[in-house]
């Protein structure tokens, strides 16, 4: 069946990477069991390296699991990012049967994950449009980090 994947914060990152895994695993299958129709990211981290720098400027990098989760290297952070997942699928031949619709929702008052994460990722996705995504929509509001779940979705 068709699914829409939704994730918040680091779950947005994991959810997008899961969408790329499913899309990649469907390559060459005539009737895949699961097809990703869309993705909704709420206050998401899409560029791990950029977010680590943001945490370091705030003195939080030692509390963050980012280094450990990414092999303690900057290259590991780049490989783990959502852009790398997109490029991997593109390098294997893109998407068969059209791309998914992407909606990125982020608050302009978010101090946990700055809204520039969504802004920069949307720009990247538009450049890759047609290869992975059919449409990219951005929704910004006067929200904090949790508000995208509590306010924007209701």
Image: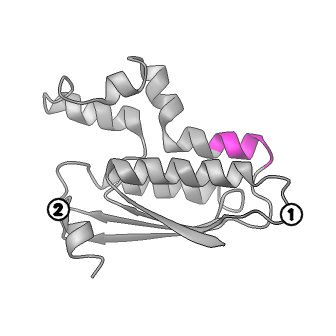
Q: Residue 42: within the magenta? A: no
| Quarter placement of the N terminus | bottom right
Q: Residue furthest left?
A: 59
Counting the numbered discs, the total is 2
Determine contact: label 2, label 1, CB under 8 Å: no
Magenta-colored span: 87-93
Residue at 37%, 51% in the rendered image: 11
Tell me where residue 149 appears, x and y as whole percent: 26, 68
The residue labelled by disc 1 is 30
The residue labelled by disc 2 is 144
Of tags 2 and 1, the one toward the viewer is: 1
Residue 141 picture quarter: bottom left
Give the Cα separation between the discs numbered 2 and 1: 43 Å
Residue at 56%, 56% in the rendered image: 125
In this image, 108 relative to 96: left or right?
left
Callout 2 environment at 10 Å: few (<14), some (14 to 19), or many (20+)? Answer: many
In this image, 134 relative to 16: left or right?
right
Tell me where residue 24 appears, x and y as whole percent: 71, 49
Tell me where residue 48 appears, x and y as whole percent: 39, 36
Front in this rendered view, residue 65 or 34: 34
In this image, 11 relative to 32: left or right?
left
Tell which circle, 2 or 1, labels the residue nearer the N-terminal end. Answer: 1
């Amino acid at each position: 069946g068709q699914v829409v994947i939704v994730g918040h914060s680091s779950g947005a990152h994991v959810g997008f990477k899961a969408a790329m895994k499913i899309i990649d695993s469907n390559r060459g299958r005539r009737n895949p069991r699961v097809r990703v129709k869309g993705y909704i990211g709420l206050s998401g981290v899409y560029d791990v390296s950029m977010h680590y720098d943001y945490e370091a400027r705030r003195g939080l990098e030692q509390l963050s699991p980012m280094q450990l989760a990414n092999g303690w290297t900057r290259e590991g952070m780049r490989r783990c990012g959502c852009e790398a997942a997109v490029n991997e699928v593109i390098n294997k031949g893109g998407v068969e049967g059209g791309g998914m619709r992407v909606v990125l929702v982020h608050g302009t008052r978010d101090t946990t994950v700055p809204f520039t994460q969504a802004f920069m990722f949307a720009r990247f996705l538009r450049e890759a449009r047609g290869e992975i995504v059919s449409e990219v929509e951005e929704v910004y509001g006067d929200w904090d980090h949790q508000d995208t779940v509590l306010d924007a979705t209701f």
